[in-house]
Image (tube, helix red, strand yellow):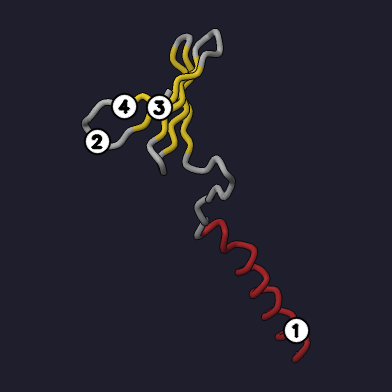
């Protein structure tokens, strides 16, 4: 009888541990050097925007790169290059 109770308690605790991610999923967090970088492709241009620094990189079809920076919301980007 004692063995059955202990095994049942262990099985229930293992079930709780196994089912917790389904009941309370944790959000994914990127930790790499590109975390916070968003990408958009529009027609012939590709844009990368770093939300942490305000940097914007634009690549066109000929792989010319334009680097701009957002310094204040509501204002235009400043040309870096």
The mark lying in front, picked from 2 and 3, is 3
Q: How far apart are labels 2 and 4 at the CA level?
A: 9 Å
**Number of other residues with Cα within 10 Å of mark 3, as a class: few under 14, some 14 to 19, many 20 or more:** few
Q: Nearer the viewer, mark 1 or mark 4?
A: 4
- Residue furthest out toward the front: 81
Q: Is residue 70 above or below residue 5?
A: above
> Which residue is depicted at the point 47% across and 41% down?
36
Identify the image quadrant of residue 20: bottom right
Q: Which residue is mark 2?
A: 73
> Which tag is nearer the camera, tag 3 or tag 1?
3
Q: Disc 4 versus disc 3: distance between alpha carbons?
A: 9 Å
As helix, strand or loop, the secondary structure at mark 4 comes to: loop
- Residue 58 at x, y = what percent? 46, 20
What residue is disc 1 on?
Answer: 4
**Relative to 17, is 31 above or below?**
above
Question: CB under 8 Å between callouts 3 and 1?
Answer: no
Circle 3 SS class: loop
Mark 1 Cα-neighbour bin, 10 Å: few <14, some 14–19, many ≥20: few
Relative height, residue 19 to residue 30 (above, below): below
What residue is disc 4 on?
77
Q: In terms of secondary structure, where does tag 1 sit?
A: helix
Whichever of labels 2 and 1 marks the residue nearer the N terminus, that label is 1
Q: Nearer the viewer, mark 2 or mark 4?
A: 4
**Distance CA(mark 2)–CA(mark 1):** 65 Å
At which x and y percent is residue 67?
A: 44, 25
Residue under pointer 3: 80
**Total numbered circles:** 4
Q: Nearer the viewer, residue 63 or 11?
A: 63
What residue is shown at x 55% (from left), y 47% (from top)?
30
Cα–Cα span, label 3 and label 1:
71 Å
Q: Secondary structure at mark 2?
A: loop
């Amino acid at each position: 009888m004692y063995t059955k109770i202990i095994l049942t308690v262990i099985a229930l605790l293992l079930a709780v541990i196994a089912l917790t991610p389904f009941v309370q999923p944790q959000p994914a967090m990127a930790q790499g050097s590109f975390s916070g970088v968003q990408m958009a492709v529009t027609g012939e241009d590709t844009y990368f925007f770093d939300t942490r620094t305000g940097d914007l990189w634009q690549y066109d079809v000929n792989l010319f790169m334009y680097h701009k920076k957002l310094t204040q919301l509501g204002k235009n980007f400043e040309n870096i290059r």
